[in-house]
Amino acid sequence: KGDTKAKTKVSVTKLLERADKEDLLGKISYIKIRLYVKAVFQGFRRSKVNQYENQARLRVDGLNSKEDVNFYLGKRVVYVYKAAKGFKTIWGKITNAHGNKGGVLARFRSNLPPRAIGATLRVMLYPQHN
């Protein structure tokens, strides 16, 4: 109670919108910035008969068209899961688009396990291509 210097989480866009109206930068002790975008592992690339486990289909948040996929090509993807001792990761890379609605294909160093279907992955916003 009464602690005015308590840390608060404020999104950057909301902060910038309200920055003109009042001096918020002096009141907020830190801003949480995420260096990744969330994605969902939908399944493996497949045809009617075959399934290609070395290519994973991902649905990236905010990606709704094939034209926007170019920004994400080459970006690193990580699947983080809980193991017996801490957390483990499987790293991959976005390789190309899948379909017209913004789906992407990714290849991982070791194939993702089937239990990861429907799980959330992290698409890192690096490497940055200009």
Image (tube, rainbow, N blue to C red):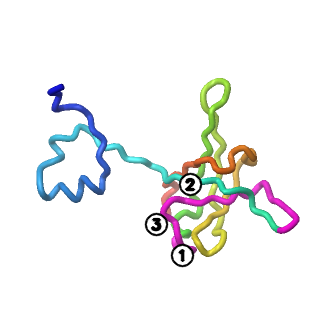
Q: Residues within 10 Å of mark 1 (few under 14, many from 20)?
A: few
Magenta stretch contains residue 51:
yes
Q: Tell me the distance, in whole angstroms, between the alpha carbons under discs 1 and 2.
A: 18 Å
Vertical order, 89 against 15 (above or below): above
Write down the quadrant of residue 105 in the picture: bottom right
Residue tagged 1:
67
Which residue occupies 52% across, 52% down?
Answer: 38
Q: Identify residue type, mark 2.
A: Ala
Q: Residues within 10 Å of mark 2 (few under 14, many from 20)?
A: many
Q: Identify residue type, mark 1.
A: Glu
Residue tagged 3:
130
**Mark 3 and mark 1 residues within 8 Å of each other at the beta carbon:** no
Whichever of labels 1 and 2 marks the residue nearer the N terminus, that label is: 2
Where is residue 78? Give x, y as percent.
60, 46
User: Left of 12 or right of it: where is 42?
Assistant: right
Labels 3, 2: front one: 2
**Mark linked to residue 27:** none
Labels 1, 2: front one: 2
Whichever of labels 3 and 2 marks the residue nearer the N terminus, that label is: 2
Where is residue 128? Give x, y as percent.
48, 59
Magenta-colored span: 48-68
Magenta stretch contains residue 93:
no
Where is residue 113? Give x, y as percent.
74, 44
Q: Identify residue type, mark 3.
A: Asn
Q: Tell me the distance, in whole angstroms, between the alpha carbons under discs 3 and 2.
A: 23 Å
Residue tagged 2:
39
Residues 51 and 31: in front is 51
Vertical order, 49 against 89 (above or below): below
Which residue occupies 19% across, 56% down?
Answer: 18
- Total labels: the figure holds 3
Whichever of labels 3 and 1 marks the residue nearer the N terminus, that label is: 1
Where is residue 111? Give x, y as percent.
75, 48
